Amino acid sequence: MALHGYIMKSYFIELFGNSPQVKVLDFFIANYWEAWSMVEISKEIKAGYSTLKILLPRLVKKDFLKVKKKVGKINFYELNLKNPVILRLVQFDWALIKHGIGVK
């Protein structure tokens, strides 16, 4: 089960827009501890499966995501926390949250 299920728009999405790529990154930043299938991601972020079929391999190629496991033909993706760019995005997202709710 996803942490926020996109009931509320995150500060990350407010700042960078509502594109599928931003929604995917925001979803994985908020749910970094778990691996997700393409079908699960599609349902959680309300993005088309065909869009994710193109987008997720691109994010894997850029080392933003990685395939944690494969069950049959189904890949389970997770955030690549070894990528320094991803670590900065996570830190930035937390800074946005703290700023947005007035924490210093």
Image (tube, grey):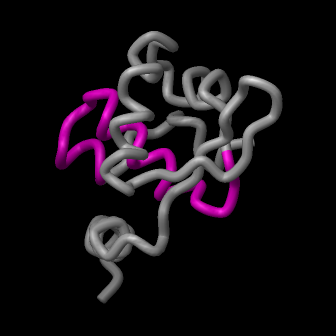
Residue 101 magenta-drawn? no
Residue found at the very far right of the displayed protein: 72
Please name whichever residue, 64 or 4, is drawn nearer the observer in this view of the structure.
64
Residue 19 highlighted magenta (yes or no): yes
> Measuring 18% from the left and 48% from the top, which residue is drawn there?
15
Q: Residue at x 51, y 13 (%)?
A: 49
Q: What span is colored magenta in the figure?
A: 12-35
Q: Is residue 98 visible?
A: no
Residue 91 at x, y percent in the picture: 34, 76
Tell me if 100 is positioned left or right of 30 in this view. Answer: left
- Left or right: 94 as drawn, with respect to 49: left
Which residue does the image show at 36% across and 29% down from the upper left?
A: 55
Residue 28 visible, this angle: yes
Query: x and y percent of residue 6 in the render?
Result: 51, 35
| The quarter of the displayed image where residue 64 is located | bottom left
Q: Is residue 100 above or below residue 51?
A: below
Q: Nearer the viewer, residue 7 or 18?
A: 18
